[in-house]
């Protein structure tokens, strides 16, 4: 168990160091997210009644598609530059490698998502600085990252990774998307635990199931 | 501790029996047999696509055999893959280094992945051994191929493997790099470990190894001691007509 | 299921054809015309729609279970069954979605109802499609089989979550449309026709999957022989 955590953390720390140094993934997906937000700004007339209706949807569409971009990079770079083999050659369990990768993907996604709060406030007067929304963001992102990291490992080994990842990923995480949008709606209209609670538990249950499943499936996916 | 089926097995660095591997329709390896003792070097020759890389990658546990037994230091590659990874070092076509990290950071990362104690000291010594101290703090991205190769070799030797696997190590190395390779292989063998080197350079292979194998279309077409043969003889086998073609 | 199973498979196909013809008769002649609210003659498409959707789901369960066994045993037979099930299942789901749309438009003035069953059907259809596509992008067939198996298992694991989420969502947003999933009591002849359709589609499913899986098995035997010969 200790070596599992230690190895996972080593992989995570390496990813964080690389990201802090190059800011490659972060800047690409943050820019993408801001552009999506802008496009929505033009696509919808951002008056309060419209925003109340479609705001949660816009936020999560932006988060999901930005996330897909980020998750694709998780393994795409490792694979293209050959370093994935270095990870697989080490006497480290596949589960630990998955855990480290999942953690770094989730971290980057969360950072981008939080940094989008001021953008949404600016463009749509949508105030996301809400404890319930933060909880939803964290739990939903964990769910996305768990499945996305695994499917990224598949997509990275193919020619059409930009298309394959969303195709594999979206039907599976549909429940979290529904849950996230519904609970965001509830959270932003001030419902607190009554409205948000059951969705939060639902998303957490999904997270647990799919973290375990993804961790288990990772070995089968990376085996040559 | 698992009981070995033969009394000899723990004494062999590598024991391969009946190894076969196909990738879909393409047969990469057919019933390959060979053994290698500790302290010995094996040179692997063959035309492009003969299966050299596949064999090296199977020994490294990156590829799973379809059939046959592959044992390294007594550990079965299929069932005891984690233990095998502990005792092998692999240098392939790609450097396995993170380009935006420095050699020092790369080696420290791998030292931790291999669970090595006193990682920092080990890394410093390793950098000195391969003569990379001057550029240990520059990103791998800006280093020349030769420098990257040296760091890649250091990476493979960090955990003192019992078997060193080299896949065309001569590519990208200049004179001093080749001299380094020479001394590295000699040092490894002297330390009681074995070396398997797939190479296109017949001179290099014969110089650094005691045994030689030529693969043709996934089959062992020649196995001998390097002292019994010369460059021309090996060349003849490598260039010989290919066997019946598969579709 | 190799060449030895040929007679069983031929029997199944023959049986399926027979049942299907009988079923057509039942659907078009025997079953009574439905009420105006349910679309009169158009409603007959219900007897294709429900069994297709149900068999699609059964196909998914078969694919997921076969995938689990495949990953455990790595025997080609299980992958062939899973793959065949996925292909046939995709076909059935496509029919279900198509017939659903044809029925819904004149009756409820909308091409699609986002109710629980509809959402689930659509999602599983997408998972099946990604299951099939992922194989073609894999570097080798064996790896593609493993990837596809993982996709099927993930899809199956997501089903209860999709069901719950879609159910709660529906509760929040739409008034319950008495859609294609409408229960209520069914007249004896309608019930009989529906049951017969279900059986027909089940036999059709088994016949098609058996045939497709056997076909793959034979292809692989040929490959095997080729390899032996050139060795």
Image (cartoon, coloured by chain):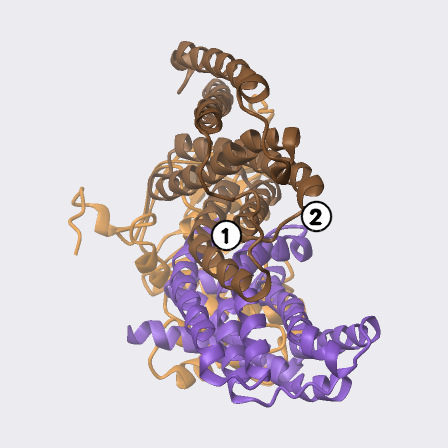
Instruction: Please give the letter of the chain rendered in purple.
Output: A
Q: Is residue A154 left or right of residue A216?
A: right
| Residue A210, image x, y percentages | 43, 62
| Residue in the image at 47% along x and 46% along y | C152
- Disc 1 to disc 2, C-alpha distance: 79 Å
The residue that mark 2 highlights is C110
Identify the mark at residue A98; answer none if there is no mark.
none
The disc numbered 2 marks a residue on which chain? C
Residue A98 placement: quadrant: bottom left
The residue that mark 1 highlights is B207
Circle 1 or circle 2, nearest the eye: 2
Residue B32 placement: quadrant: top left
Instruction: Please give the letter of the chain rendered in orange.
Output: B
Instruction: Please give the letter of the chain rendered in brown.
Output: C
How would you rate the neighbour count of disc 2 (Cα within 10 Å): few for under 14, some for 14-19, many for 20 or more? Answer: few
Residue A30 drawn above or below residue B96: below
Quadrant for the N terminus of chain A, please. Answer: bottom left
């Amino acid at each position: 168990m200790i070596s599992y955590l230690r190895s996972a953390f080593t992989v995570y720390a390496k990813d964080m160091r690389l990201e802090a140094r190059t800011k490659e993934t972060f800047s690409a997906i943050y820019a993408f997210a801001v552009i999506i937000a802008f496009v929505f700004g033009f696509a919808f007339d951002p008056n309060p009644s419209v925003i109340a209706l479609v705001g949660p949807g816009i936020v999560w569409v932006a988060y999901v598609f930005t996330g897909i971009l980020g998750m694709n990079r998780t393994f795409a770079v490792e694979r293209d530059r050959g370093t994935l083999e270095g990870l697989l050659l080490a006497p480290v369990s596949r589960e630990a490698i998955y855990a480290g990768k999942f953690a770094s993907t989730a971290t980057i996604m969360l950072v981008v998502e939080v940094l989008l709060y001021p953008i949404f406030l600016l463009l749509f007067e949508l105030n996301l600085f809400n404890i319930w929304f933060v909880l939803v963001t964290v739990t939903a992102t964990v769910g996305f990252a768990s499945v996305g990291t695994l499917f990224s490992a598949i997509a990275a080994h193919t020619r059409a990774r930009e298309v394959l990842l969303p195709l594999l990923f979206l039907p599976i995480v549909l429940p979290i998307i529904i849950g996230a949008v519904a609970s965001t709606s509830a959270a932003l209209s001030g419902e607190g635990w009554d409205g948000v609670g059951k969705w939060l538990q639902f998303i957490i249950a999904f997270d647990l199931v799919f973290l375990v499943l993804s961790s288990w499936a990772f070995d089968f996916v990376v085996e040559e | 501790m698992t009981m070995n089926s033969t009394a000899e097995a723990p004494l062999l660095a590598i024991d391969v029996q009946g190894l076969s591997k196909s990738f879909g329709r393409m047969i990469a390896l057919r019933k390959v047999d060979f053994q290698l003792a500790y302290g010995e070097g094996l040179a692997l020759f063959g035309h492009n696509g003969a299966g050299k890389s596949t064999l090296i990658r199977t020994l490294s546990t990156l590829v799973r055999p379809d059939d046959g037994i592959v044992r390294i230091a007594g550990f079965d590659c299929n069932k005891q893959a984690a233990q095998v990874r502990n005792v092998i070092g692999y240098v392939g076509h790609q450097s396995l280094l993170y380009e935006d990290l420095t050699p020092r950071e790369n080696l420290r990362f791998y030292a931790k992945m291999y669970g090595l104690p006193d990682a920092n000291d080990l890394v410093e010594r390793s950098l000195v051994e391969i003569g990379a101290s001057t550029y240990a703090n520059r990103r791998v991205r800006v280093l020349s191929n030769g420098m990257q190769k040296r760091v890649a070799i250091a990476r493979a030797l960090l955990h003192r493997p019992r078997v060193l696997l080299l896949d065309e190590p001569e590519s990208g190395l200049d004179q001093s790099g080749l001299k380094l390779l020479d001394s590295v292989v000699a040092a490894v063998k002297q330390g009681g470990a074995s070396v398997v080197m797939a190479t296109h350079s017949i001179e290099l292979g014969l110089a650094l190894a005691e045994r030689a194998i030529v693969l043709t279309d996934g089959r062992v077409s020649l196995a001998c001691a390097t002292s019994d043969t010369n460059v021309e003889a090996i060349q003849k086998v490598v260039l010989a007509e290919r066997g019946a073609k598969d579709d | 299921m190799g060449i030895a199973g040929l007679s069983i498979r031929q029997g199944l196909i023959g049986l399926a054809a027979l049942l299907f013809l009988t079923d057509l008769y039942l659907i078009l002649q025997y079953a009574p015309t439905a009420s105006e609210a349910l679309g009169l003659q158009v409603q007959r498409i219900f007897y294709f729609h429900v069994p297709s959707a149900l068999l699609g789901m059964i196909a998914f369960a078969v694919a997921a279970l076969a995938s689990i066994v495949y990953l455990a045993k790595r025997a080609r037979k299980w992958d062939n069954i899973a793959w065949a099930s996925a292909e046939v299942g995709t076909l059935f789901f496509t029919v279900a979605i198509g017939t659903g749309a044809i029925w819904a438009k004149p009756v409820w003035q909308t091409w699609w109802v986002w109710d629980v069953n509809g959402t689930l059907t659509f999602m599983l259809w997408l998972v099946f499609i990604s299951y099939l596509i992922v194989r073609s992008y894999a570097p080798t067939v064996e790896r593609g089989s493993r990837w596809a198996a993982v996709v099927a298992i993930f899809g199956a694991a997501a089903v209860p979550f999709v069901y719950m989420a879609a159910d709660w969502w529906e509760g929040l947003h739409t008034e319950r449309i008495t859609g294609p999933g409408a229960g209520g009591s069914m007249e004896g002849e309608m019930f009989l026709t529906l049951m017969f359709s279900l059986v027909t589609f089940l036999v059709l499913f088994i016949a098609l999957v058996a045939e497709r899986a056997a076909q793959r098995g034979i292809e692989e035997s040929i490959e095997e022989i080729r390899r032996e010969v050139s060795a």
